[in-house]
Structure formats: C-alpha cells, structure tokens
Amino acid sequence: MKNNLFILFVLILLIPSSSFSADKQYYFVFLNTNPNREKLSEEETMKLQEGHLNNINRLAKEGKLITAGPVKGGGGIFILIASSMDEANEYLQTDPAIKANRFNLEVYPMNIAEGNLCKVDSDDFEMVSYTLTRYKGDFVSKDKSKLLIQIEFEDINEGIAVFNYDLEKGNMEELNDYFLADENIYTKTLWIGKGSFCE
C-alpha cells in the first residue's frame, strides 16, 4: 500500500511550459515536514496521505500543478501555475495534509534561470532520483553537464538547482565541482518523474 501511494505521489502529469498563458506565474512550494505535527495512528496517516495524493493528481489534471516530488528525509516540492499568490495558496489549501498542518509551507514566485520544465508522458513514466540544492545569494554553474534546472525565487535572494547526480553514490565534494553558491542551505535527494526537467 505504501509503495502504491509513493508511486502515485510522483506520477504527476506535467503540462508543456509553452502552453501557459502569459498572465500566469510559476510558484515554487517547499513542503517542509512540520516537526510539531499531531501524532496520528498509522491508519489516520495513510488516509491523510491518500487524500494528499488524490489532491495532487486532481490539481495536475486541472493544469494547476506542474510537477511534484518527495525529498529524502521528508517533505517535498510542488511547482504550481496560478494567476496570483492568493490563487496558488487557494490550490494548496485543497490538500488535506496541508490543512492538517503536516507541512510548513514556503511559497515563492519563481523564474527559470537555466533549463526548462517538460511534460512527462504517463504511459512511459519512470521515477528517478536527482540532487536538489537550495542556495542563497549568487549561483554559478561551473560545469553545466549535470545541471538540469536552476530556479530563482522572486523577492528573496534564494533559489534551487537540480542536478542529474546521484547523491547516494557520490559525495558533496564531487558535487561542488559543478557549482558555486554564496551559501548552500541544503542538498537533498529528490524523486521525480524522468523528463520533468527536459533531460
């Protein structure tokens, strides 16, 4: 059951970025695990997770959720498309896990600095792991061979970069050969549909 829910979570259909209306904006969402979340039984947790995953699929089908994926250690990311921050937050509040305070949310308008988002064909879906780095300040890609996408957040001097790099088999010292950032806030493994970043 847990495996099916995990696969369902990452089985998100992406909409080609070229089809978005000019009056829409991308919003990047960190779903940080809430350390103060209420303790629930396994049954209650699974029911909440099922509702969370069903809502993800509904938002994706409606073209509101561009991509989503969990990160190692808990939590995950969303990329939404909405007309405003208020609208993006309305989408988020339809999620039962969010309404139950399972996550501490951070929502930022975003711009793609390098790379792109692409549609993943659900008939040929394959889940892969990449390395997600959240940074502060300036970001310089020293070697773009592993960089899939770089996203900058508006209104704060932060962003993320996703690398086609297996952090489980590699190490931070080697990964640091590919980029330089003023401050590396954290680096985690991200699971997402292969092709989400046009690789």
Image (cartoon, grey):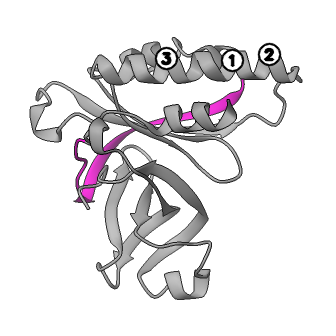
Q: Quadrant of the C terminus?
A: bottom left
- The answer to which image quadrant residue 169 occupies is bottom right
Task: Give the image location of residue 71, x and y in percent.
Answer: 59, 50
Which residue is drawn at the image coordinates 57% and 60% (left, top)?
189
What amino acid type is highlighted by mark number 1?
Answer: Leu
Nearer to me, 81 or 48: 48
What amino acid type is highlighted by mark number 2?
Answer: Glu
Task: Give the image location of residue 81, x and y in percent.
Answer: 30, 28
Task: Give the image location of residue 35, x and y in percent.
Answer: 82, 37
Sequence-first tag of 3 and 1: 1
- Mark 2 → mark 3, Cα distance in angstroms: 17 Å
- How packed mark 1 is, by other alpha carbons closer than 10 Å (few <14, some 14-19, many 20 or more), is many
Does the magenta run of residues contain 103? Answer: yes
Task: Give the image location of residue 118, x and y in percent.
Answer: 22, 46
Q: Which residue is mark 1?
A: 48
Q: Is residue 128 above or below residue 184?
A: above
Nearer to me, 156 or 103: 103
The answer to whether one can see residue 98 in this image is no
Q: Which residue is mark 2?
A: 44
Q: Which residue is mark 3?
A: 55
Q: Is residue 124 left or right of residue 90?
A: left
- The answer to which image quadrant residue 128 occupies is bottom left
Read off the magenta span: 101-119
